[in-house]
Image: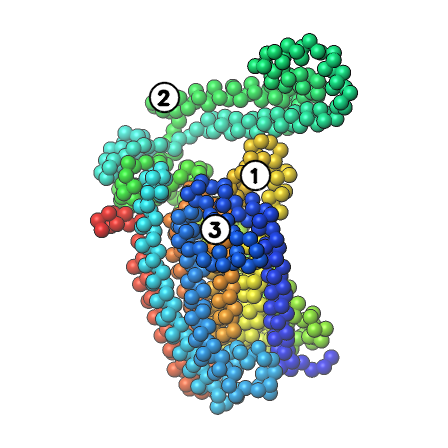
Amino acid sequence: MSQVTPAKAQNTDSQTFLTALVTNAAILSLEIIAFVFLKHRLSRIYEPRTYLPPPSKRAVKLPSGWWRWTLAIAAIPTGDVLQKNGMDAYMFLRFLRLLVILFASITVLSCGILLPVDTAGLTEDNFSDKLARLSWGKYVDFQPYATGRYAAHVAVVWLSTFWTCYLIRRELQHYTKMRHEFLISPAHSSLAQARTVLITNIPVEMCNEHELRRWASFVPGGVQNIWIYRDTQDLNKDYTARLKACKKLEKAASKLIRTVVKAKRKQDAASEKQYRKTHKDEIRKNERDGSEDADNDSERLLDLYAPPNKRPRHRTGFLGLFGRKVDTIEWYKDEIARLNTSINEKRGDLYDRGKDAPRPLGSAFIQCNLQMGAHVLAQCISYHAPLAMYDKYVEVSPRDVIWDNIDDGAYETRFRYVTSWLGSVVLIIIWFAPVAFVGTLSNVATLCEKLSWTCWIRDAPTPVPGIIQGILPPLFLAILFAILPWVLKGLAWYENIPRWSLLSMSVYKRYFFFLVVHGFLIVTLSSGFASAASNIAKDPTTTVADLASQLPNASIFFLTWTLTQGLTGAGSALLQVGQLIGHFVRKWLLGRTPRQAYAVTFMMPKAIYPQANFGLVLPRISLLATIGLAYSVISPIINPLATVSFMLFFLSWKFLLTWVFDQPDEAETGGQYFPLAINFLFVGMYIEQTCLAALFFLNVANNLVFIVEGVLMVILMIFTLCAQILLRRSFLRECLSGGLDQEAKC
C-alpha cells in the first residue's frame, strides 16, 4: 500500500462532516414532513392536551398547514408551561433557553475572533483539509504565527467563562424566585402533598401517634393527620390479590362478551327469525314489561350463544394446571367478595388493637394544617440520637413513595448508598472496552496512519469513509447507552431512596457522570490513542504528552455527534416514533377490557407512557452542553452547531410539554433538577480549561510565552472553582428548601 502521511490521514474530516450534515438534515426533513402529515390525523398522539385535561390546563389547537405550527410553537409563552405542567417542565425549558443564549454568545465570540485568527495565513500546505483550518492547529510548527494566535484563544476563554458565570447566577436568581412563587401558589399549596412530611428512622418509643403529636406541637398551625407505616403484610397480600382478581374477572367478562357478540354475528337471519316465531308469546310478554326487557334479552343471548360449557373456566391449582375446574366469572366474584370482607376487617383492626396492632417500621407521614408548618418541621433537628429522624422529605405524595425503601434502618441506608455508588464506579470501569472501540472507530483516518491495513477505508468510494466515521460511531454509541438507564435505575433503587422523583434525580447524577466518562473522556482519549500508540511503545514517558496533543483530533466525532443529536434527535422528539408505535401496539394488546380501552383512548399519555422523565432526558442535554463548552475554543465550529441543536431541542420540548405530555403532581419536585443541571455546566468549563492548560504547557519548549498562557488557564480554573462554590453556597439552601418562612415575612 502507498505511504500514509498525517495530511492524507486527516483529509477525510470535511467529508465526514458533510456526510453527517447531509444525512441528518435529510432525516430531520423526513421527520418534520411526517409530523406535519400526522399531527392533525392523530391528535391523540400529537395534541392530547387540547381536549383531554381539565379546561384550565388545556392547550390551544395547533394551526393547520405546513409551516404555521412553527410560529404557534415559537409564539406561545414559556410561562404557559408553568401553569399547565408544573415547575419541572418550566425550568427544563429555561435550561434549554439558557444553553441557546450561552452558545449563541460564544458563537459570536468565536466567529468574530477565533475563526479569523485560526485561518489567517494558513494554506493547503499546512492543513490539506478545510475543516482542520477551523480547529485548533499545531501553530508551533508554523512560526511566527503561534504566539499571537493562542493569545486570542486565552482571551476568548476568559470572556466566555465570565459570561457563563453571569448567566448561571441570573438563572439561579430567577429559579429561586419562581420556585417560591410556585410552592405558595394556590394551585400547589392546596394539594395534600404540599403539607405532608415523610420522616424515616423513627425510634421505637416515638412510633405512636401520641408521641409524634406531642413532639410536633411546636409546628405553626399544628398537625392535622399522622399515619405510621406499619407491618401490614397480610393486608397488602389481600389487597394485591383483590386487584389481581378484579383484573381476571374483567378479562373473563370481556372474553365472554366477545364470544357472545361473535357468535351472534355469525347467526344467520333465518335462524333468528325462526327463534322469534317459536318464542312469539315470550317476546310479546317482554315487550309489555319494559323493565325486564334488557335483563331477559341479556340472559337470552347468554343462554343462546354462551351455554355453560362455553363460558370461561379455569383450574384453581398451581399456575392453573391443577385443581378443581370452576366457572371463572362466578369464582372470581366470590373471591372478590371474600377479599373485600377480609380487607375491611384488617383495616378496622389496624388501629383498634392497641398494643396488638402491627409493629411500626420506623417511618411516619405527618400532614400539617399549614404548608409553612410542613417546611418548618422538615428543617428542624428532631432527635438527640445520631441519624435518628434525620431524613425528612417534604412534598410527599403516596403515589411517589417507594414503599419497599422506607422500612430500613439508618445504617443500612448509608451502607446501601455507599455500595450503590461503588457499583456505579465498577460499572463505569467494565464499560470501558466497548466505548473505547467506538472511539477508535470514530477516528479511523488517524488509525490509517499507523495501521496500513485499514487504508481501504480511506481509499473506498466517497460515501463510505464518511459513513464509517460520521454515522456508525454515533449509532453504535446510542445503542450501547440505550440499555444503560435500566441498570442505573436499579442501582438507584438499591440505594434505598424513598421517592420515585428523588430516584429519578439520582439516576440523572449517575447517568451524567457515566456519559461524561464514557461518552466524552474515553472516546476522546481512545481517538488520540490510535495515532500515539507507536510513540508510546517506543517511549512510555511521553504518554501524557502524546495523548494531550491528540485531543483536538477527536473533535470530528463530537461535531458529527452534535449534528446527530441536534438534528435527528430533535426531530425524533417531535415525531415521537416510539410513542406512535407503542400507542397502536398497546391499543391492540391492552385494549382487551373496558378499563384498558378507556386508558388507551381517553387518558393522558402518562397513563400509557412514562411522562417526560427528566432523569433520562437531562443527562443527554447536559452531556451535549459539556462537549460544546469543552470544544468551544479547540473547535469553534461546534458553537453554531450547538446553538442550532439546543434551539431545535427547545422548540421540540416546548411543543411536547405544551401539547403532549402531562406531568403528574405527585412526581413534581419544584424544579430541583435545575440546580443539578446548572452545576454540571461547570464540568464542561473545567475540562476546557484543563485541556487548554495541558496543551499550553506541552508547547513550552517551543516558546516561553506558553508558560504565561498556561498559568492564566490555571488561574481561570481557580476562579471558576471559587465561583461555583460561591454560587452553590448562595443558592443551595434557597433552591432545595422552599424558603416559605422567609417568603411569608417578606
Q: Which residue was labeled with disc 3?
A: 657
> Can residue 423 be seen?
no
CB within 8 Å, label 3 to label 2: no
Name which residue type carries label 1: Thr
> Can residue 313 be seen?
yes
Lower position in the chain sequence, tag 3 or tag 2 = 2
Instruction: From this view, report whether residue 64 is shown above or below residue 607.
Output: below
Lower position in the chain sequence, tag 3 or tag 1 = 1
Q: CA distance from mark 3 to mark 1?
A: 20 Å
Name which residue type carries label 3: Leu
Closest to the observer, 742 or 2: 742
Name which residue type carries label 2: Arg
Residue 12: image x %, image y %? 64, 75
Q: CA distance from mark 3 to mark 2?
A: 49 Å
Q: What kind of element bears circle 3?
A: helix
Residue displayed at 49% across by 45% down? 49
Q: Which residue was labeled with disc 1?
A: 601
Q: Which residue was labeled with disc 2?
A: 353
CB within 8 Å, label 3 to label 1: no
Q: What kind of element bears circle 1?
A: helix
Residue displayed at 64% across by 69% down? 19
- Is the residue marked by circle 2 packed among few (<14), some (14-19), or many (20+) residues within 10 Å? few
